[in-house]
Image (cartoon, rainbow, N blue to C red):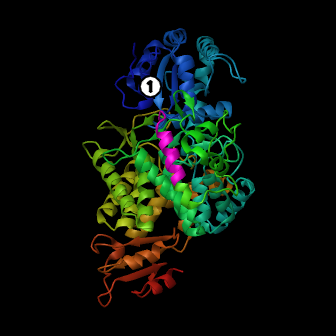
Amino acid sequence: MGNRLGGQTSPYLLQHADNPVDWYPWGPEALARARSTGRPILVSIGYSACHWCHVMEQESFEDPETAAYMNAHLVCVKVDREERPDIDAIYTDACHAMTGRAGWPLNAFLTPGQVPFFAGTYFPREARGGLPPWRTVLERVVDAWRTRRFQIDLGADRIVERLAGGARLAPSADEPRPEGLAQARRRLGELFDTEHGGFGEAPKFPPASALEFLLADGETEMATRTLEAMAAGGIYDQVGGGFSRYAVDGAWVVPHFEKMLYDNALLARVYLHGWLVLGDERYRDVCCETLDWALREMRGEEGGFASSLDADSEGVEGRYYTWTIDQLRAALGEQADEVATWYGATPEGNFEATNVLVRASGAAPPADRRAEVLRRLSEARDRRVRPARDDKRLTAWNALMISALAEAGAVLEREDYLAAATACARFVLDDLRDSGGRLLRTYKDGTATLNAYLEDHAFLLEALVALYEASFDPRWYREARKVADTMIERFADDRHGGFFETSSDHERLVARRKDLSDTPLPAGNSSAALGLLRLAALSGEAEYERRADGVLRLTHELAHEHPQSFGHVLQALQFRLADVREVALAGPDTRELQRVVRSRHRPHVVLAGGEPDEVPLLAGRGPVDGQAAAYVCEGFSCRRPVTAAAELEALLG
């Protein structure tokens, strides 16, 4: 038995290819089928690592009787949210508006014209937890479509207008001001969990963008408490490195065990910056352990990175990562009881009679013994069945990893990290383009498909700027400008400012949206703003700055009021309002001068070096008396060049 998903490249869609449900992928065939039959469309959205997506599949989509009912009354469409963030954003917003909540699996029922009229998330096979059975939901939807079609169609225009989201937002009449950043800091302080770190209550997601804003601002209390709590908690894999997607509790102890590439790229960079600002060596270790995990478990032969690891193995969530006391004893022998104390393991367990390892307060393992203990635990864990890996490569998420590897490689002088960033950038630019040179979204098994979105272009812009600053290879600067120009040409909103999520030549959906919120990863608009501002400082191109300002005029008031949801916008606002320093290094050997720039977290410095003819910031700059020299400019004026590291340190402060 099979359906129409067998020819897809998405691992998530392929997981459903043998369901008795007659799934279509999103596309003209499914939409035409709905129009010709007059049936409503079920769009069921999820992703490969989603635990409750697997549960709903097993309970309902693999059930022949349920599938037969769905096939008889609906046109059923499966969507991978990671491949199609445009579709996911539209119907996630609809679900949130209709129910007050959203998540995955997401199940939205649409008219043949793609307008949603009912939506929800997980529905069980049998009623539980206040949720009706999936079969009951189906019957009610089919009945409403049959008996109340007129009312559904009558409300379509209002719903479509609502789905436009940020695209309806007009720019503020007020310019961004420093007082707004102070307001954002105060709001984060009001939301801060003083006991466990982070913001708000459980479930807790790692607040990477908000932490970057705080670290750039020099705030230490909230950043320190959160970085320490996450690194000590079960959300961080104490054995193998890397972070799970979120914690189900407020203390970061029990994670939802799936590991996403984007979280780990963002958090590796946050911990690098935390080390530079706060000086805690543990933060540097977490950065390196996270990047090493990505290189070891997520990197493909071509240099790109897979999307995620599943939460489940052998059908059980967390089985690969959790330990009983007996399992610790089998792996460690007589050391087990002491190690159990270090990592908070008890006979009762903290997760379904097993233990998620945490760093117990006051019981950290000695450094000289920790490596050996983790080696033995890792060897024992490697004998278990590993979680499934979603091995599609997404342009946007790979770009985030390029940024993390490039900066860590430069700051820590890790050539392996810089080489991995370079290889990944080559992969994206060479293999994730169509025959006309346009960027594509996803790659699997040698094939790249789907139009790239704003976030793909924006994250790649930031990554290429970071890789240029780390390597001084002018290719990355040139490519950054090409990406920026394409992004402006194909995504910019010349009327209200900012950028649409989809390009001007993208397929027509029920709404063309703007992505504004920086959760769980930066929005395409905020990333575009920060990338364009940094590129403007390197290039002197005023148009890049003007386009970035268009984003900030749309979002700065929202960011001040809701900083936990706009952390990347706040970083762009910081950069725009800061006294940005442009540092150009010229000469035969600039390594000592580079070390000065990179010895501290300097988010409002842009750095150029290499061939003077390629980058405008380098124009006319050369060595001084045969020595490598640093040229520092700020506010349209430049200081005299310096050649000594101490002099550069004094200029940068």
Q: Please tell me which residue lies in front, 372 or 85.
A: 372
Q: Is residue 162 above or below residue 142?
A: below
Label 1 CA crowd tier, 10 Å (few <14, some 14–19, many 20+): some
What residue occupies the far front of the structure in this picture? 334
What residue occupies the far bottom of the structure in this picture? 625
Residue name at image x 48 percent, y 19 percent: 76
Residue name at image x 62 percent, y 50 percent: 565
Q: Please tell me which residue lies in front, 248 or 449.
A: 248
Q: Is residue 42 above or below residue 483?
A: above
Q: Position of residue 267 (x, y in %)?
A: 53, 54
Q: Quadrant of the C terminus?
A: bottom right
Q: Magenta residues: mostly which secondary structure?
A: helix
What residue occupies the far left of the structure in this picture? 435
Residue name at image x 51 percent, y 53 percent: 372
Q: Position of residue 251 (x, y in %)?
A: 70, 48
**For residue 630, side relative to residue 226 (left or right):** left
Q: Is residue 12 magenta?
A: no
Q: Quadrant of the N terminus?
A: top left
Q: Is residue 379 magenta?
A: yes
- Residue that label 1 marks: 15
Q: Position of residue 89 (x, y in %)?
A: 53, 37
Describe the element under mark 1 as helix, strand or loop: helix
| Residues rendered magenta in the picture | 372-386
Q: Is residue 408 above or below residue 90?
A: below
Q: Please tell me which residue lies in front, 9 or 582.
A: 9
**Would you say residue 514 is visible in this rendering?**
no
**Amino acid type, callout 1:** Gln
Q: Please tell me which residue lies in front, 465 or 317.
A: 317
Number of marks: 1
Image quadrant where residue 167 sits: top right
**Would you say residue 293 is visible in this rendering?**
yes
